[in-house]
Amino acid sequence: MDVTGTLDEALERLHHSGPERLGRLTNHAPMAVEALTARGQARAVHRWLDLYARKLEEFPSRVEPVTTANWRSALGEPSRVADWIGFFEREVAERPWPDVLGQWWPRLLPGMYGGSTHPVIRVGHAVRTLLSGEITEPRLSELAHGLGYWAARHRPVTDLAPLAGGDSAAAALDAVPPITAQDGGFPTRLDRVEALPVWAAEVVEPADAHRRLTELVRAATHRYATHGHGEETMLVHAATAPNAVLRALPALPHALWPSSLRAAWTASAAVTAMYAPAAAVPCTPPGGLTPEEVFELALSHGDEHVIKLTDTALDVGDAPALAAALRSMELSAPMR
């Protein structure tokens, strides 16, 4: 199986589509096909895409080119997503992609909460591919699509009151207070998040930031097994958003790692607050299933969020994480 060719063909196929549909729902296909390829399931990529194709929309129209002189006025403007993608396609064609990422990461990081955190997740998948395999035009273009989507959906979170939290990531997530009214879409709920526990704010050393971010991904993934029923789709992002940041760290200057940890914590904690269930449920052990067998089950299920959470669960690699992946398959409807 030509894994490089399969992924590149899929990305070229997908780059004719926009990053969203119906003006608000994210196109998950680029992230899912990258996960399938990374987990040894390249043979299933085009078959999965054929099923997902009904959810794709045409690439949006351009408005006005984004440039190094006018980018600030276009930041956070969803109608400019095609302009932003074009800007980043030019950037990665003219400069080394790590330089582009390193320049724009601190500009985009404060707004990683727009688009239900999907833009940073898409960037994380693109970076993993670029770090682990051959550098090709479709893969560079995928990074440009992810960064452009992020810039267009840039949405900061500010004025959060600090609350006391536990020393561990798991304890801090347990201390997150649910928002009062749990209704409405992601932007509406995000506006209701007013206070979050302070966790890892004191971290300044890059190695500590990496360790704490790894801990956060593990804790959020484990938590899905017992709390995912609060909202089976949206609570996936409490784990996958910080994991996207973790995947990007090796391509970023070490000086950016502590701020990346803090932004990832805010994202995970905010999603936890927005969709917290009334009570936890017991966790179902994964039995004797191997990680590879669990991922095959995720592929058979087909749901894009199931695939992405299982991909993150395999990064964590322990039994509670695999239980979270299996729980997501129980909670979510299979793709037909």
Image: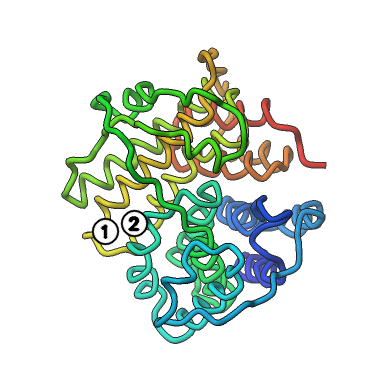
> Helix or strand or loop: what does disc 1 sit on?
helix
Instruction: Measure how far apart labels 1 and 2 are at the Cα level.
Output: 8 Å
* Label 2, residues with CA under 10 Å away: few <14, some 14-19, many ≥20: many
Assign a secondary structure to mark 2. helix
Residue 38 place in picture, x, y as percent: 56, 55
Relative height, residue 242 to residue 254 (above, below): above
Snapshot quadrant of residue 286: top right
Residue 232, horizontal then vertical, whole percent = 62, 30
* Residue 257 vertical position relative to residue 99 in the rendered view, above or below: above
Instruction: Name the residue at 49% across, 67% down.
Output: 133
Q: Nearer the viewer, residue 142 or 23?
A: 23
Name the quadrant of the C terminus.
Answer: top right
Q: Which residue is disc 1 drawn over?
A: 256
Look at label 1 and name its amino acid. Leu
Residue at point 63%, 65% (across, down):
7
Up the image or down, 120 lies above or below 281; here it is: below
In the rendered image, which residue does mark 2 sit on?
A: 249
Viewport quadrant of the N terminus: bottom right
What type is the residue that disc 2 sits on? Leu
Q: Say if mark 1 contacts mark 2, CB within 8 Å.
A: no
Dot 1 crowding, Cα within 10 Å, few <14, some 14–19, many 20+: some
Which numbered disc, 1 or 2, marks the residue that appears first in the sequence?
Answer: 2
The structure residue drawn at horizontal position 17% and vertical position 41%, both measured from the top left corner, is 202
Where residue 219 appears, as percent x and y from the top left, is: 39, 30
Q: Nearer the viewer, mark 1 or mark 2?
A: 1
Task: Name the spot of residue 41 as percent of width and height, x first.
Answer: 65, 52
